[in-house]
Amino acid sequence: MNELKNDKNLHEAVSRREQKLPPMPADLNERLMQRLEEPATASATKQKRLWLYAAVAAAASIALLMVFNFGKQQSVEEPLVAHQTIKQAPPQFTSATVIEVPQEEAVQVKASSLPQSAKKHRKVVTKRVELIPTEEQDPFVMMAAQVEDIRSRGQRLHQEIEQRMSN
Amino acid sequence: MEQDSTILICDLQQHQPAACQRLLSTYGPMVFRMVQRIVTCREDAEEVYQDVFVKALRGIGGYDPHQASLATWLNRIAYHESLNFVRGKKPTIIYIGESTLGTDQTEEPYDALQDEETIQQLEKALAKLPPHEQAIVSMFYYDNMSLADIAYVTGSITSTVGSQLSRIRKKLYKIIKTL
Protein backbone atom coordinates (compact mmCIF):
# COMPACT_ATOMS: atom_id res chain seq x y z
CA MET A 1 0.00 0.00 0.00
CA ASN A 2 2.85 2.33 0.89
CA GLU A 3 4.54 1.50 -2.40
CA LEU A 4 1.44 2.62 -4.18
CA LYS A 5 1.21 5.86 -2.24
CA ASN A 6 4.91 6.65 -2.56
CA ASP A 7 5.15 6.16 -6.29
CA LYS A 8 5.86 9.77 -7.19
CA ASN A 9 6.44 9.01 -10.85
CA LEU A 10 3.07 7.43 -11.26
CA HIS A 11 1.46 10.19 -9.23
CA GLU A 12 3.03 12.80 -11.47
CA ALA A 13 2.18 10.91 -14.65
CA VAL A 14 -1.47 10.65 -13.61
CA SER A 15 -1.57 14.35 -12.66
CA ARG A 16 -0.13 15.42 -16.02
CA ARG A 17 -2.53 13.19 -17.85
CA GLU A 18 -5.49 14.59 -15.93
CA GLN A 19 -4.39 18.14 -16.61
CA LYS A 20 -4.33 17.43 -20.31
CA LEU A 21 -8.02 16.60 -20.25
CA PRO A 22 -10.05 19.38 -21.90
CA PRO A 23 -12.15 21.48 -19.54
CA MET A 24 -15.90 21.09 -19.34
CA PRO A 25 -17.77 23.17 -21.94
CA ALA A 26 -19.28 26.30 -20.39
CA ASP A 27 -22.72 25.76 -21.89
CA LEU A 28 -22.95 22.08 -21.00
CA ASN A 29 -24.85 22.72 -17.78
CA GLU A 30 -27.24 25.10 -19.56
CA ARG A 31 -27.93 22.44 -22.18
CA LEU A 32 -28.47 19.91 -19.45
CA MET A 33 -30.89 22.23 -17.64
CA GLN A 34 -32.85 22.69 -20.87
CA ARG A 35 -32.96 18.94 -21.29
CA LEU A 36 -34.18 18.52 -17.73
CA GLU A 37 -36.91 21.12 -18.20
CA GLU A 38 -38.08 19.62 -21.50
CA PRO A 39 -39.63 16.46 -20.06
CA ALA A 40 -41.93 18.52 -17.79
CA THR A 41 -43.45 20.42 -20.71
CA ALA A 42 -43.28 17.38 -22.95
CA SER A 43 -45.12 15.28 -20.39
CA ALA A 44 -47.85 17.94 -20.09
CA THR A 45 -48.44 17.95 -23.83
CA LYS A 46 -48.19 14.20 -23.90
CA GLN A 47 -50.82 13.96 -21.19
CA LYS A 48 -53.11 16.34 -23.07
CA ARG A 49 -52.67 14.27 -26.20
CA LEU A 50 -53.39 11.12 -24.25
CA TRP A 51 -56.63 12.60 -22.90
CA LEU A 52 -57.62 13.59 -26.42
CA TYR A 53 -56.92 10.10 -27.71
CA ALA A 54 -58.86 8.61 -24.80
CA ALA A 55 -61.86 10.88 -25.51
CA VAL A 56 -61.80 10.06 -29.22
CA ALA A 57 -61.51 6.36 -28.46
CA ALA A 58 -64.42 6.52 -26.01
CA ALA A 59 -66.60 8.41 -28.51
CA ALA A 60 -65.70 5.97 -31.26
CA SER A 61 -66.47 2.97 -29.09
CA ILE A 62 -69.85 4.44 -28.07
CA ALA A 63 -70.66 5.12 -31.72
CA LEU A 64 -69.64 1.60 -32.69
CA LEU A 65 -71.68 0.16 -29.85
CA MET A 66 -74.74 2.09 -30.98
CA VAL A 67 -74.26 1.08 -34.61
CA PHE A 68 -73.89 -2.58 -33.67
CA ASN A 69 -76.81 -2.46 -31.27
CA PHE A 70 -79.20 -0.90 -33.81
CA GLY A 71 -77.89 -3.15 -36.53
CA LYS A 72 -78.61 -6.15 -34.37
CA GLN A 73 -82.17 -5.00 -33.62
CA GLN A 74 -82.86 -4.51 -37.31
CA SER A 75 -81.47 -7.88 -38.14
CA VAL A 76 -83.82 -9.46 -35.57
CA GLU A 77 -86.84 -7.59 -36.83
CA GLU A 78 -86.22 -7.95 -40.54
CA PRO A 79 -86.85 -11.70 -40.81
CA LEU A 80 -89.99 -11.39 -38.73
CA VAL A 81 -91.33 -8.63 -40.94
CA ALA A 82 -90.29 -10.56 -44.01
CA HIS A 83 -91.94 -13.65 -42.58
CA GLN A 84 -95.16 -11.79 -42.05
CA THR A 85 -95.22 -9.78 -45.24
CA ILE A 86 -93.47 -11.86 -47.85
CA LYS A 87 -93.28 -15.53 -46.94
CA GLN A 88 -96.69 -15.79 -45.33
CA ALA A 89 -98.73 -13.52 -47.46
CA PRO A 90 -102.18 -12.80 -46.17
CA PRO A 91 -104.79 -15.28 -47.42
CA GLN A 92 -106.87 -14.27 -50.37
CA PHE A 93 -110.46 -13.64 -49.51
CA THR A 94 -112.64 -14.47 -52.42
CA SER A 95 -116.03 -14.20 -50.80
CA ALA A 96 -117.51 -13.18 -47.54
CA THR A 97 -118.96 -15.88 -45.31
CA VAL A 98 -121.31 -15.02 -42.54
CA ILE A 99 -120.93 -16.89 -39.36
CA GLU A 100 -124.10 -17.96 -37.71
CA VAL A 101 -124.59 -15.49 -35.02
CA PRO A 102 -127.82 -15.15 -33.14
CA GLN A 103 -129.68 -12.09 -34.26
CA GLU A 104 -130.98 -9.52 -31.90
CA GLU A 105 -134.52 -10.05 -33.13
CA ALA A 106 -134.32 -13.76 -32.42
CA VAL A 107 -134.01 -13.06 -28.76
CA GLN A 108 -137.33 -11.86 -27.45
CA VAL A 109 -136.39 -10.56 -24.13
CA LYS A 110 -137.32 -7.25 -22.69
CA ALA A 111 -134.28 -5.11 -22.39
CA SER A 112 -135.41 -3.75 -19.06
CA SER A 113 -135.75 -7.24 -17.58
CA LEU A 114 -132.23 -8.25 -18.60
CA PRO A 115 -129.46 -7.98 -16.02
CA GLN A 116 -126.46 -5.75 -16.68
CA SER A 117 -124.21 -8.63 -17.73
CA ALA A 118 -126.75 -9.71 -20.33
CA LYS A 119 -126.90 -6.20 -21.70
CA LYS A 120 -123.17 -6.24 -22.18
CA HIS A 121 -123.37 -9.52 -24.03
CA ARG A 122 -126.04 -8.15 -26.33
CA LYS A 123 -123.60 -5.58 -27.56
CA VAL A 124 -120.99 -8.21 -28.20
CA VAL A 125 -123.37 -10.40 -30.10
CA THR A 126 -124.05 -7.74 -32.66
CA LYS A 127 -120.49 -8.02 -33.93
CA ARG A 128 -120.29 -10.12 -37.03
CA VAL A 129 -117.36 -11.74 -38.68
CA GLU A 130 -117.85 -11.53 -42.35
CA LEU A 131 -114.51 -12.28 -43.93
CA ILE A 132 -113.51 -15.89 -43.92
CA PRO A 133 -111.14 -17.26 -46.55
CA THR A 134 -112.52 -19.88 -48.82
CA GLU A 135 -109.38 -21.84 -49.51
CA GLU A 136 -106.79 -21.12 -46.83
CA GLN A 137 -108.33 -20.02 -43.60
CA ASP A 138 -106.47 -17.50 -41.49
CA PRO A 139 -105.92 -18.99 -38.03
CA PHE A 140 -106.64 -15.64 -36.39
CA VAL A 141 -109.94 -15.31 -38.18
CA MET A 142 -110.83 -18.88 -37.28
CA MET A 143 -109.99 -18.28 -33.68
CA ALA A 144 -112.07 -15.11 -33.65
CA ALA A 145 -114.98 -17.01 -35.13
CA GLN A 146 -114.65 -19.72 -32.50
CA VAL A 147 -114.56 -17.14 -29.74
CA GLU A 148 -117.62 -15.49 -31.22
CA ASP A 149 -119.38 -18.83 -31.42
CA ILE A 150 -118.62 -19.61 -27.79
CA ARG A 151 -119.85 -16.21 -26.77
CA SER A 152 -123.08 -16.55 -28.70
CA ARG A 153 -123.74 -19.98 -27.21
CA GLY A 154 -123.10 -18.60 -23.78
CA GLN A 155 -125.45 -15.75 -24.60
CA ARG A 156 -128.18 -18.05 -25.75
CA LEU A 157 -127.76 -20.19 -22.66
CA HIS A 158 -127.97 -17.14 -20.51
CA GLN A 159 -131.09 -15.90 -22.23
CA GLU A 160 -132.77 -19.28 -21.85
CA ILE A 161 -131.98 -19.24 -18.16
CA GLU A 162 -133.38 -15.75 -17.90
CA GLN A 163 -136.58 -16.77 -19.68
CA ARG A 164 -137.08 -19.78 -17.47
CA MET A 165 -136.44 -17.71 -14.41
CA SER A 166 -139.02 -15.11 -15.51
CA ASN A 167 -141.58 -17.79 -16.33
CA MET B 1 -20.07 21.20 3.95
CA GLU B 2 -21.99 18.16 5.10
CA GLN B 3 -24.90 20.36 6.14
CA ASP B 4 -24.86 22.08 2.73
CA SER B 5 -24.94 18.73 1.07
CA THR B 6 -27.87 17.61 3.25
CA ILE B 7 -29.83 20.77 2.36
CA LEU B 8 -28.96 20.28 -1.29
CA ILE B 9 -30.20 16.69 -1.22
CA CYS B 10 -33.47 17.77 0.46
CA ASP B 11 -33.98 20.47 -2.16
CA LEU B 12 -33.19 18.03 -4.96
CA GLN B 13 -35.70 15.57 -3.58
CA GLN B 14 -38.28 18.36 -3.77
CA HIS B 15 -37.32 18.93 -7.44
CA GLN B 16 -36.23 22.53 -7.01
CA PRO B 17 -34.57 23.93 -10.17
CA ALA B 18 -32.20 26.10 -8.13
CA ALA B 19 -30.94 23.02 -6.31
CA CYS B 20 -30.39 21.32 -9.62
CA GLN B 21 -28.26 24.22 -10.83
CA ARG B 22 -26.32 24.15 -7.58
CA LEU B 23 -25.67 20.45 -8.01
CA LEU B 24 -24.39 20.97 -11.54
CA SER B 25 -22.11 23.86 -10.65
CA THR B 26 -20.68 22.07 -7.60
CA TYR B 27 -20.28 18.54 -8.87
CA GLY B 28 -20.41 19.01 -12.65
CA PRO B 29 -16.65 19.37 -13.31
CA MET B 30 -15.85 16.36 -11.12
CA VAL B 31 -18.42 14.20 -12.93
CA PHE B 32 -17.25 15.41 -16.34
CA ARG B 33 -13.69 14.49 -15.43
CA MET B 34 -14.77 11.01 -14.40
CA VAL B 35 -16.67 10.56 -17.65
CA GLN B 36 -13.74 11.81 -19.73
CA ARG B 37 -11.39 9.28 -18.16
CA ILE B 38 -13.45 6.52 -19.70
CA VAL B 39 -15.21 8.12 -22.69
CA THR B 40 -12.50 9.78 -24.75
CA CYS B 41 -14.69 11.27 -27.51
CA ARG B 42 -15.77 14.74 -26.37
CA GLU B 43 -19.28 14.64 -27.86
CA ASP B 44 -19.86 11.24 -26.35
CA ALA B 45 -18.55 12.42 -23.01
CA GLU B 46 -21.00 15.34 -23.04
CA GLU B 47 -23.86 12.98 -23.81
CA VAL B 48 -22.87 10.61 -21.03
CA TYR B 49 -22.44 13.55 -18.63
CA GLN B 50 -26.03 14.58 -19.28
CA ASP B 51 -27.24 11.03 -18.84
CA VAL B 52 -25.43 10.80 -15.52
CA PHE B 53 -27.25 13.81 -14.09
CA VAL B 54 -30.60 12.77 -15.51
CA LYS B 55 -30.13 9.40 -13.82
CA ALA B 56 -28.88 10.99 -10.61
CA LEU B 57 -31.84 13.35 -10.37
CA ARG B 58 -34.25 10.52 -11.01
CA GLY B 59 -32.61 8.36 -8.38
CA ILE B 60 -31.96 11.03 -5.76
CA GLY B 61 -34.79 9.60 -3.66
CA GLY B 62 -32.85 6.36 -3.29
CA TYR B 63 -29.58 8.02 -2.28
CA ASP B 64 -28.41 7.02 1.19
CA PRO B 65 -26.00 9.58 2.74
CA HIS B 66 -24.79 6.95 5.23
CA GLN B 67 -23.37 4.78 2.46
CA ALA B 68 -21.28 7.41 0.67
CA SER B 69 -20.95 11.14 0.12
CA LEU B 70 -22.93 12.79 -2.65
CA ALA B 71 -19.73 13.22 -4.69
CA THR B 72 -18.87 9.53 -4.40
CA TRP B 73 -22.43 8.58 -5.28
CA LEU B 74 -22.32 10.77 -8.39
CA ASN B 75 -18.91 9.33 -9.31
CA ARG B 76 -20.38 5.85 -9.01
CA ILE B 77 -23.15 6.71 -11.45
CA ALA B 78 -20.67 8.40 -13.80
CA TYR B 79 -18.27 5.44 -13.68
CA HIS B 80 -20.94 2.86 -14.51
CA GLU B 81 -22.71 5.03 -17.07
CA SER B 82 -19.42 5.67 -18.88
CA LEU B 83 -18.41 2.03 -18.83
CA ASN B 84 -21.82 1.01 -20.13
CA PHE B 85 -21.48 3.55 -22.91
CA VAL B 86 -18.01 2.33 -23.87
CA ARG B 87 -19.14 -1.30 -23.78
CA GLY B 88 -22.16 -0.43 -25.88
CA LYS B 89 -19.95 1.20 -28.47
CA LYS B 90 -17.80 -1.95 -28.71
CA PRO B 91 -14.49 -0.18 -29.36
CA THR B 92 -11.96 -1.66 -31.69
CA ILE B 93 -9.08 -0.53 -29.48
CA ILE B 94 -7.16 -3.48 -28.06
CA TYR B 95 -5.84 -2.80 -24.60
CA ILE B 96 -2.77 -4.51 -23.29
CA GLY B 97 -3.72 -7.36 -21.02
CA GLU B 98 -1.73 -9.28 -18.41
CA SER B 99 -1.05 -12.22 -20.73
CA THR B 100 0.69 -10.13 -23.38
CA LEU B 101 3.15 -8.79 -20.83
CA GLY B 102 4.81 -12.07 -19.93
CA THR B 103 4.77 -14.03 -16.69
CA ASP B 104 7.25 -12.00 -14.71
CA GLN B 105 4.94 -11.45 -11.73
CA THR B 106 7.51 -11.18 -8.93
CA GLU B 107 9.45 -8.25 -10.29
CA GLU B 108 8.74 -5.06 -8.38
CA PRO B 109 8.62 -1.71 -10.18
CA TYR B 110 11.80 0.26 -9.64
CA ASP B 111 11.74 2.81 -6.90
CA ALA B 112 10.44 6.20 -7.13
CA LEU B 113 13.16 8.67 -7.74
CA GLN B 114 11.29 11.24 -9.71
CA ASP B 115 12.46 10.78 -13.26
CA GLU B 116 11.15 12.75 -16.21
CA GLU B 117 11.69 9.95 -18.68
CA THR B 118 9.81 7.47 -16.50
CA ILE B 119 6.97 9.92 -16.03
CA GLN B 120 6.60 10.38 -19.77
CA GLN B 121 6.71 6.65 -20.32
CA LEU B 122 4.13 6.12 -17.58
CA GLU B 123 1.87 8.66 -19.26
CA LYS B 124 2.07 6.68 -22.47
CA ALA B 125 1.55 3.45 -20.58
CA LEU B 126 -1.53 4.83 -18.85
CA ALA B 127 -3.10 5.43 -22.25
CA LYS B 128 -2.75 1.72 -22.96
CA LEU B 129 -4.72 0.65 -19.92
CA PRO B 130 -8.38 -0.32 -20.27
CA PRO B 131 -10.74 2.55 -19.30
CA HIS B 132 -11.85 1.10 -15.98
CA GLU B 133 -8.24 0.65 -14.86
CA GLN B 134 -7.37 4.18 -15.93
CA ALA B 135 -10.31 5.43 -13.88
CA ILE B 136 -9.22 3.49 -10.79
CA VAL B 137 -5.65 4.83 -11.02
CA SER B 138 -6.93 8.40 -11.48
CA MET B 139 -9.33 8.10 -8.55
CA PHE B 140 -6.49 6.92 -6.32
CA TYR B 141 -3.67 9.22 -7.45
CA TYR B 142 -5.46 12.32 -8.67
CA ASP B 143 -8.73 12.47 -6.70
CA ASN B 144 -7.03 11.03 -3.59
CA MET B 145 -10.05 8.89 -2.95
CA SER B 146 -9.90 6.24 -0.25
CA LEU B 147 -9.95 2.58 -1.20
CA ALA B 148 -13.40 2.29 0.40
CA ASP B 149 -14.75 5.08 -1.79
CA ILE B 150 -13.16 3.60 -4.91
CA ALA B 151 -14.72 0.27 -3.96
CA TYR B 152 -18.11 1.96 -3.63
CA VAL B 153 -17.70 3.64 -7.02
CA THR B 154 -16.61 0.48 -8.80
CA GLY B 155 -19.03 -1.77 -6.94
CA SER B 156 -16.21 -3.82 -5.48
CA ILE B 157 -14.68 -4.39 -2.04
CA THR B 158 -11.78 -2.47 -0.47
CA SER B 159 -9.27 -5.33 -0.48
CA THR B 160 -10.00 -6.07 -4.12
CA VAL B 161 -9.37 -2.43 -5.04
CA GLY B 162 -6.03 -2.50 -3.20
CA SER B 163 -4.86 -5.60 -5.03
CA GLN B 164 -6.20 -4.23 -8.28
CA LEU B 165 -4.18 -1.04 -7.86
CA SER B 166 -0.92 -2.84 -7.17
CA ARG B 167 -1.55 -5.14 -10.12
CA ILE B 168 -2.21 -2.14 -12.39
CA ARG B 169 0.97 -0.45 -11.16
CA LYS B 170 3.04 -3.52 -11.96
CA LYS B 171 1.36 -3.73 -15.30
CA LEU B 172 2.26 -0.12 -16.09
CA TYR B 173 5.95 -0.74 -15.40
CA LYS B 174 5.82 -3.82 -17.57
CA ILE B 175 4.30 -1.78 -20.39
CA ILE B 176 7.14 0.72 -20.02
CA LYS B 177 9.61 -2.09 -20.69
CA THR B 178 7.86 -2.95 -23.91
CA LEU B 179 7.88 0.67 -25.16
Image: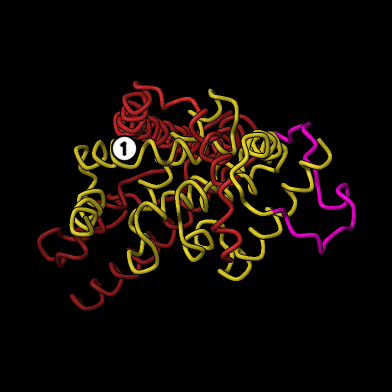
- The image quarter in which residue B67 lies: bottom left
In the image, the chain rendered in yellow is: B
Question: In the rendered structure, which amino acid carries the disc numbered 1?
Answer: Leu
Q: In the displayed image of the protein, which residue is found farthest to the front?
A: B113
Q: Main secondary structure of the magenta part?
A: loop
- Res. B88 visible in picture: no
Q: Is residue A128 above or below residue A44?
A: below
Q: Is residue B66 above or below residue A84?
A: below
Range drawn in magenta: B89-110
Judge left or right: residue A39 versus residue B170.
left
In the image, the chain rendered in red is: A
Seen at 56% across and 65% down, the residue is A2
Q: Foreground: B157 or A12?
A: A12
Q: Position of residue B134 (x, y in %)?
A: 62, 44
Does B90 lie within the magenta span? yes
- The image quarter in which residue B23 lies: top left
- The image quarter in which residue B44 lies: top right
